[in-house]
Amino acid sequence: MKAALFACVLVLPLAASAQTLRATLPPITYHVGRVSAPLFHSPDTTRRPSFVVPSLAEVVVVGRFSPQLVVARRDGFLYLTPINRLSDYDPEDASPLPLDPQTQLITYQGVVQVPGVSQADLYARARAWATNTYSTTPNAMQQ
């Protein structure tokens, strides 16, 4: 009996550390749907949630815990919330951005082809839009 109790005392901290929530993705803000979203401290979602985020509020997702749960950050602490309570959740949003190792700026490679339009035509359209949208004269209010 003492040996079993001793084994449980040694194994329980390992099991608790395996369930520790971690931020594994860059923070992305999502909106809660029409039903409020519960925030749980642990994967045991049968218990009462620690917090409830009201509907149409924002949640900052910083990781994925399982196919049904994501890790959310609130006031510096990490919680679990169900994915189906987020109205605009898209797992592809969390894919890493291509960063240049020297400048740490986003780098994109390749050219996107637009069928039926040449590159010169696209540049001409962009130039015309910019000149029509942003005038070179200062906008001053007259009183």
Image: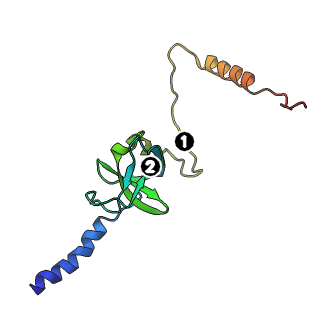
Q: Nearer the viewer, mark 2 or mark 1?
A: 2
Label 1 SS: loop
Marking on residue 54: 2
The answer to whether mark 2 and mark 1 are in CB contact below 8 A is no
Q: Position of residue 21 (x, y in %)?
A: 36, 62
Q: Residue 69: image x %, image y %?
A: 32, 51
Say what amino acid the circle numbered 1 marks.
Thr
Pinpoint residue 49: horizontal percent, then vertical percent.
Answer: 34, 59
Could you tell me residue 75's position as x and y percent?
49, 61
> Image check: 111 left or right of 70?
right
Instruction: Report helix, strand or loop for mark 2.
Output: loop
Q: Could you tell which of marks 2 and 1 lies nearer the N-terminus?
A: 2
**Residue found at x 60% / y 50%:** 103
Give above or below for 134 relative to 14: above
For this orientation, the residue located farthest to the left is 1
Q: Which residue occupies the foreground of this view, 52 or 90?
A: 52
- Type of residue at label 2? Pro
Write down the quadrant of residue 18 in the picture: bottom left
- Asked whether 82 or 67 is in front, the reply is 82
The residue where tag 1 is placed is 107
| Dot 2 crowding, Cα within 10 Å, few <14, some 14–19, many 20+ | some
